[in-house]
Image (cartoon, rainbow, N blue to C red):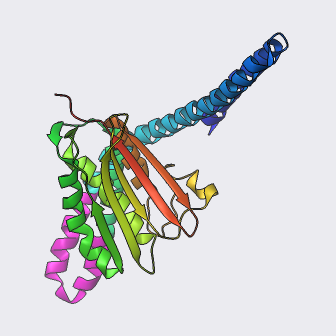
Amino acid sequence: MESENIYRKKMEQQILESAQSYHKLVDFLPEPIIINMNESVDNSKEMMQEIMESLIQSERLATVGKLAAGVAHEIRNPLTALRGFCQLLGEKYTDDSYYFNIMITELDRINMIVNDFMTLSNPQIAEFKNENINKILQSVISILETQALLNNVIIVASYHEVPPIRCEEGQLKQVFMNVINNAIHAMPTGGEIKVSTQVKRDGYIQVSIEDDGIGIPEDILRRVGEPFFTTKVNGTGLGLMISRRIIENHNGLFAISSKVNQGTTVTINLTKATE
C-alpha cells in the first residue's frame, strides 16, 4: 500500500508540473495551436494515468511473487504427506471414508492455491511453440461445454482464419478456461457466451470472450485482477491476476470491459509467430 502511494504521488507531481508548464506557454500561442495542445495535454494525462496504473499493478505482482516464492514450496511438502495419509486411512477405515474424502477435497483446494502461488513466483515459460489459437480455444470449449450446458449456458464459437502464434499451449488453455469459467458463473440463470478470433489491423490476433451475464459494477471492475480480491465465495482472487500475467509473458494484452445487466467482454490480444 505504501509503495502504491509513492507511485501515485510521483506521477501526480509529474502531471502537475506538465500542466503548470503548459499554462505558462499558452499565453504566448495563437488559438489554433492552443486547441491542438489542449488535445495533446488530455492525451498525455490519460497516458500518465495508464502508466501509473501499470506501475502499481507491477508492484502488486512483485509483492505477491515474493510472498509466493517464500512460502509455497514449504507448504506443498506437508500437504503431500497429509493427503497421502488421509487416503491411506480412508482405505483402512471405510466406515469413515466420507469424512476422509472431505479432508482430501479440502487439501486439494489448498494445493490449488499453492499452485497459483507457484505460478506467480515462477512465471518463466518453459517452451514456446507455433500453435493455432483456434484449435487451443476449441479444445478448451470441448472440456467446458458439458459444464456450460448443466448451467443452461450455450457457448458459440466464431473462428476466423488467423496465423499461428508463438506460445506455451498449456498456459493459454489455463487462461481461456479461467475466463470462460468466470463467464459461466456470471450467468446464474443461463445465457450465451460468444468466443471469437480475428486479426486486427495492428497485426494482433484478438480473442474475444463475451457473456450476457450480470456484468461488473464500475467500482468492482477497477479492482479486478488485484491479488486476493474476489467476489466468489470459494475464490482465491488469483485467477485473473495469473491470467493477466501469463498474457503479459506472451507479449500480449489483457483487457476487461463490462456493463451491469448487459454482460462482460474479455479481450486478449496476442502477437503472431514470426516467420
Q: Is residue 215 left or right of residue 140?
A: right
Residue 238 visible in the current orientation: no
Residue 54 image point, x, y percent = 52, 35
Majority SS type along the magenta span: helix
Q: Quadrant of residue 48?
A: top right
Name the image quarter holding the N terminus: top right
Residue 155 image point, x, y percent = 31, 69
Q: Please give the range of residues in magenta.
A: 79-105
Q: Is residue 210 magenta?
A: no
Name which residue lies at 37% across and 67% down: 193
Name which residue lies at 21% across and 42% down: 168
Name which residue lies at 27% across and 56% down: 78
Name which residue lies at 55% across and 62% down: 216
- As rendered, which of 241 and 145 lies closer to the eye? 145
In this rendering, is residue 47 above or below 227? above
Q: Residue furthest bottom?
A: 95
Q: Is residue 154 left or right of residue 56?
A: left
Q: Quadrant of residue 182?
A: bottom left
- As rendered, which of 87 and 215 lies closer to the eye? 215
Q: Is residue 104 magenta?
A: yes
- As rendered, which of 268 and 197 lies closer to the eye? 197
Q: Is residue 256 left or right of residue 208?
A: right
Q: Residue furthest top?
A: 28
